[in-house]
């Protein structure tokens, strides 16, 4: 899913919550994470909440303003 200013955060939640994803940043970096939730009530902007363990425990945030694309991947 290409992430733009018009991307609805709940569409991201529906498509990727509880799944392993590759997050491609605008700078070209790719990070493989387990998406836990979304966060839209913070000072910086909308974000996905992720960890690298595959549990539903909360972890860190990746802000959508830095993301170019998100796609489903496998755990391995």
Image: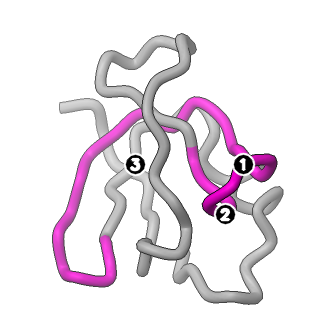
Residues marked 1 and 2 touching at CB (< 8 Å): yes
On the image, the x and y values in percent for residue 8 come to 80, 72
Marked residue nearer the N-terminal end (2 or 3): 3
Instruction: Indicate left or right for 7 with 35 as reference.
Output: right
Give the image quarter of residue 47: bottom right
Image spot of residue 26 (x, y percent): 32, 83
Q: For residue 71: magenta?
A: no
For the residues labelled 1 and 2, the Cα–Cα distance comes to 6 Å
Q: How is the image coloured?
A: one colour
Distance CA(mark 3)–CA(mark 1): 23 Å
Q: Of marks 3 and 1, which one's residue comes earlier in the chain?
A: 3
How many other residues sit within 10 Å of disc 1, few (<14), some (14-19) or many (≥20)? Answer: few
| Circle 3 Cα neighbour tier, 10 Å, few/some/many (<14 / 14–19 / ≥20) | many
Helix, strand or loop at disc 2?
loop
Q: Which residue is mark 3?
A: 21
Q: CA distance from mark 2 to mark 3?
A: 20 Å
Vertical order, 58 against 42 (above or below): above
Residue under label 2, please give it.
Answer: 45
Q: Which residue is mark 1?
A: 42
Asked whether 1 or 3 is in front, the reply is 3
Q: Is residue 35 a member of the stretch shown in magenta?
A: yes
Which region of the structure is painted magenta? 25-48
Residue at (56, 14) in percent of width and height: 56
Rendered location of residue 23, percent (x, y): 36, 60
Direction front: furthest residue = 43
Quadrant housing residue 33: top left
Which residue is painted at 53% across and 75% down in the image? 65
């Amino acid at each position: 899913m290409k992430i733009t200013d018009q991307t609805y955060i709940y569409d991201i939640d529906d498509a990727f919550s509880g799944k392993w994803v590759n997050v491609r940043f605008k700078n070209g970096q790719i990070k493989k994470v387990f998406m836990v939730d979304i966060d839209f009530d913070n000072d910086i902007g909308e974000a996905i909440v992720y960890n690298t363990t595959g549990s539903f425990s909360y972890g860190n945030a990746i802000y959508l303003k830095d993301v170019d694309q998100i796609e489903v991947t496998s755990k391995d």
